[in-house]
Image (cartoon, helix red, strand yellow):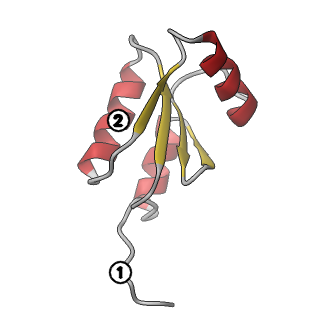
Amino acid sequence: MAKVEIYTTASCSWCLAAKMLVKQKGHAYEEVRVDTDPAKFAEMLSRSKRQSVPQIFIDDEFVGGYEDLVAAVRAGRLDEPTGDPA
């Protein structure tokens, strides 16, 4: 299962949409609230080079914001591996 991290704030509707999409795909996620912890905001900025939320990482790889997550899902990024080596 993919490791999903989502940097969020409490009042962000795109953050909620991102969390719902990841959940619908059957994955757990780690929510990192940047509005309650300045150090986490600095961490997000360092990792993503962006100040807006959500910022999403899958398996420690930067995906981007909500629209980038949607594109990643459409590309099969959160589909479970079949176990069949290519």
Determine whether 23 is above or below 74 in the image: above
Compare residues 70 and 62 and report the one nearer the observer.
62
Residue at disc 2, secondary structure: helix
Determine whether 86 is above or below 67 in the image: below
Residue at disc 1, secondary structure: loop
Determine whether 72 is above or below 69 in the image: below
Q: Residue at x 60, y 50 (%)?
A: 60
For residue 71, which numbered disc appears in the image? none
Residue denoted by label 1: 82
Q: Where is residue 53 in the image (x, y as percent from the top left)?
A: 53, 23
Q: Where is residue 86 in the image (x, y as percent from the top left)?
A: 51, 90
Determine whether 67 is above or below 33 in the image: below
Q: Where is residue 35 in the image (x, y as percent from the top left)?
A: 52, 10
- Residue 44: image quadrant is top right
Compare residues 51 and 83 and report the one nearer the observer.
83
Q: In this view, does 43 lie to the left or right of 55?
A: right
Q: Which residue is drawn at 32% across and 51% down?
A: 27
User: Which quarter of the figure is the N terminus placed in?
Assistant: bottom left
Q: In this view, does 18 lie to the left or right of 52?
A: left
- Neighbourhood count class around disc 1 (C-alpha, 10 Å): few under 14, some 14–19, many 20 upward: few
Q: Residue at x 54, y 17 (%)?
A: 34
Q: In this view, does 27 lie to the left or right of 74?
A: left
For residue 19, which numbered disc appears in the image? 2
Amino acid residing under circle 2: Lys
Q: Position of residue 14 (x, y in %)?
A: 41, 26
C-alpha gap between disc 1 and disc 2: 24 Å
Q: Residue at x 33, y 46 (%)?
A: 28
